[in-house]
């Protein structure tokens, strides 16, 4: 489980490339963590 460096949980948003990115810290992932 990876916590967001901005505090708390990552705020995942699904991008047009079908990958998730955190709107708070900019982390990217193929799926929600």
Image: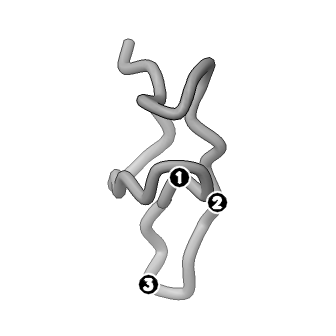
Q: Nearer the viewer, mark 2 or mark 1?
A: 1
Q: CA distance from mark 2 to mark 3?
A: 11 Å
Q: Give coordinates of residue 12: x percent, y percent.
A: 61, 49
Instruction: Please tell me whether residue 15 is drawn above or below residue 19 in the rendered image.
Output: below
Q: Give the residue furthest to the top.
A: 1
The residue lying toward the viewer, choosing from 20 and 6, is 6
Instruction: Please tell me whether residue 14 is drawn above or below residue 3 in the rendered image.
Output: below
Label 2's element?
strand
Q: CA distance from mark 2 to mark 1?
A: 6 Å
Question: Number of marks in the image?
Answer: 3
Instruction: Please tell me whether residue 12 is drawn above or below residue 8 in the rendered image.
Output: below
Question: What residue sits right under mark 1 in the picture?
Answer: 22
Q: CA distance from mark 1 to mark 3?
A: 14 Å
Residue at the image point whose x is 43% and y is 67% from the top: 19
Label 3's element?
loop
Quarter placement of the N terminus = top left
Q: Give coordinates of residue 26: x percent, y percent.
A: 43, 59
Residue at the image point whose x is 62% and y is 18% from the top: 8
Label 1's element?
strand
The residue lying toward the viewer, choosing from 12 and 4, is 4
Q: Earlier in the sequence, mark 1 or mark 3?
A: 3
Question: What residue sits right under mark 3 in the picture?
Answer: 17
Q: Nearer the viewer, mark 1 or mark 3?
A: 1
Question: What residue sits right under mark 2 in the picture?
Answer: 13
């Amino acid at each position: 489980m990876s916590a967001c460096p901005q505090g708390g949980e990552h705020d995942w948003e699904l991008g047009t490339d079908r990958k998730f990115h955190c709107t708070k810290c900019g982390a990217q992932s193929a799926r929600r963590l």
